[in-house]
Image (cartoon, rainbow, N blue to C red):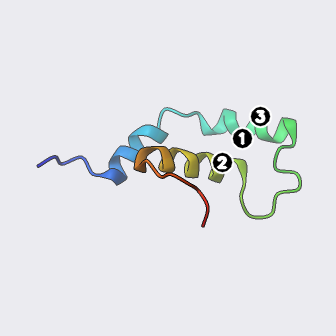
Amino acid sequence: MDKITRKTSFGQWFSPLNLQLFEEQVKTMKLDYYTKKLTTESFLKLLLFAQLEEVESLHA
């Protein structure tokens, strides 16, 4: 059995992203200016998780 779990796989997918640069770009372009709950960073994490889990829809 593999020792790689979904949680560590998700961490490996997410680790190459430069979140500091990403956050600077979001602030520069004011992408989260009117956002209250679903920020750009959390949406990116959600999108990567959905891709990893092969989810058909992000609808709750």
Report whether 39 appears left or right of 34: left
Give the residue drawn at x 24%, y 46%. Answer: 4
Q: Residue under circle 2?
A: 41
Under mark 1, the amino acid is Glu
1 and 2 marks in contact (CB < 8 Å): yes
Residue 59 lies, in percent from the top left, at: 61, 61
Q: Residue furthest bottom?
A: 60
Where 22 sits versus 1, above or below?
above
Answer few, some or many: residues within 10 Å of disc 2's Cα (few below 14, many 20 plus, some between 14 and 19). Answer: some
Q: Residue furthest left?
A: 1
Residue 9 lies, in percent from the top left, at: 35, 44
Give the residue drawn at x 61%, y 45%. Answer: 44
Q: Residue under circle 3?
A: 25
Under mark 2, the amino acid is Glu
| Residue 57 placement: quadrant | bottom right
3 and 1 marks in contact (CB < 8 Å): yes
For the residues carrying marks 1 and 2, which lies nearer the camera in this image?
Answer: 2
Report whether 24 appears left or right of 60: right
Distance from Cα at disc 3 to Cα at disc 2: 11 Å
Residue 8 lies, in percent from the top left, at: 34, 48
Q: Secondary structure at mark 1?
A: helix
Q: Residue under circle 1?
A: 23
Q: Secondary structure at mark 2?
A: helix
Report whether 15 appears left or right of 39: left
